[in-house]
Amino acid sequence: MSAETSHYTGLILVSGVDSPGITRALFETLAPFAVTILDIEQVVIRERLILTALISLNPDHAQAIEADLNECAQVLSVDIATSFGAQEGATIAAKTGLVHVVLLTTELHPRSIAAVAEAITAQSGNIERIHRTASYPITAIELTVSGANTAKLRQSLAAVSNEFSIDIAVSPGGLMRWAKKLVVLDVDSTLIQQEVIELLAAHAGVEPQVREITERAMRGELDFRQSLEARVALLAGLPEKVIADVREQIVLTPGARTLIETLHKLGHNVAVVSGGFTAVIEPILKDLGIAHYRANTLEVIDGKLTGKVIGDVIDRAAKAVALRDFAKIVGVKLEQTIAIGDGANDLDMIAIAGMGIAFNAKPAVKAAADSSVSAPYLDSVLYLLGISREDIEEAGASRR
């Protein structure tokens, strides 16, 4: 084939009801000709097949190839459309600087997709590919985008997320997307469904007072350290055995075990940093296989809580320090860390992590995070990392 004819290409589009043998028949039809496959993609949605192929060919063979493809279409009972012509350059240039956009929602509507596409276009981006990574219990759609700046696109899509109440995550593509990661989780209302100190307060009969202090802290009247000390002081005299009772009340957030087990199966690391209490959560973390964690320590003397915390307080700043320390311990760069939390106490670690995720979080946390998850399923985080529902189920099957 001459240099001139090498620039002659043909686009083939096959569509119809899927059945075994269509792909084989198409390429067997092309096999007798001097054809090179330049690009190919196939998808099946609800038993409907769409298969595209870009080929280079000798223009003298175009008419014969088209005739054979029409005959193939009749035999297979599918539609085959073709477009042949000269093209500058017979090879497909590799795309660089790709950005991945993941949409999470319980119901995906056309207006949401249109708004996302408009925001991408406004940032000079082009959608190269769209595919579904999950359909239950939430829908996850991943778009691969070229030509857009990650930070600017993230900012534009944040407005779309707020307007249409869908979760959107934007992350750079490339090989590092699949590098080993460290995922650091908050505990109360993130890893677990409850607030541990409120469970302890209920046993001490001081839950209303503890809630009032929490609300004062949320209004900015107290910082975390002050509010922690004030709330723990109300627990003075509580029998130590209550800690075990509270532990039995704790319920993991739906999807928490799946998230952790899948990450471990794929070679990633998981750590926990909590403003709660080590004595309560430590056995739970060991059961989940989490080796790295930090939390506050309740002082116990003569079998009773003294109403004091001993050692360093795990506050907002300490959570960020813990994330850095854990990253060094497991040998992961800071840009490959992921911080997940729901409250103001998580803001510092969310800010320094490679990806900060607000999980069913307060508005201020959602605004500060790179992405958010509003669905009550913690394993939804996996979709933001490019892990599909099929991958999750396969990892789960291999553990059984």
Image (spheres, grey):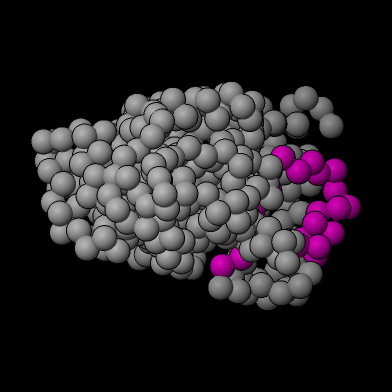
Q: Nearer the viewer, residue 126 or 64?
A: 126
Residue beneath the point at 46% across and 45% down? 278
Instruction: Looking at this view, name the residue that lies furthest to the front.
Output: 302
Numbered-mark total: 0
For this rendering, which residue is in front, 66 or 242? Answer: 242
Question: Can you see residue 259?
Answer: no
On the image, which quarter does residue 390 sit in?
A: bottom right
* Residue stretch rendered in magenta on the structure: 23-45
Quadrant containing the N terminus is top right
Q: Is residue 276 magenta?
A: no
**Left or right placement of residue 110 versus residue 142 in this view:** left
Residue 281 visible in the picture: yes
Question: In the figure, 148 relative to 396: above or below?
Answer: above
User: From the viewer's perspective, is residue 86 above or below residue 164?
Assistant: above
Q: Position of residue 310 (x, y in %)?
A: 38, 34
Image x and y of residue 145, in percent: 47, 38
Which residue is at a point 37% across and 52% down the rendered structure image?
304
Could you tell me which residue is drawn at 35 percent across and 38 percent down?
309
Query: In the picture, residue 378 is in which quadrant?
Result: bottom left
Q: Tell which of 1 and 193 is nearer to you.
A: 193
Residue 240 falls left or right of residue 53: left
The residue lying at 85 percent from left, 43 percent from top is 34
Quadrant containing the C terminus in the rendered view:
bottom right
Image vertical order of residue 354 relative to residue 187, above or below: above
175 left or right of 27? Answer: left
Residue 259's x, y, as percent? 55, 54
Q: Is residue 41 magenta?
A: yes
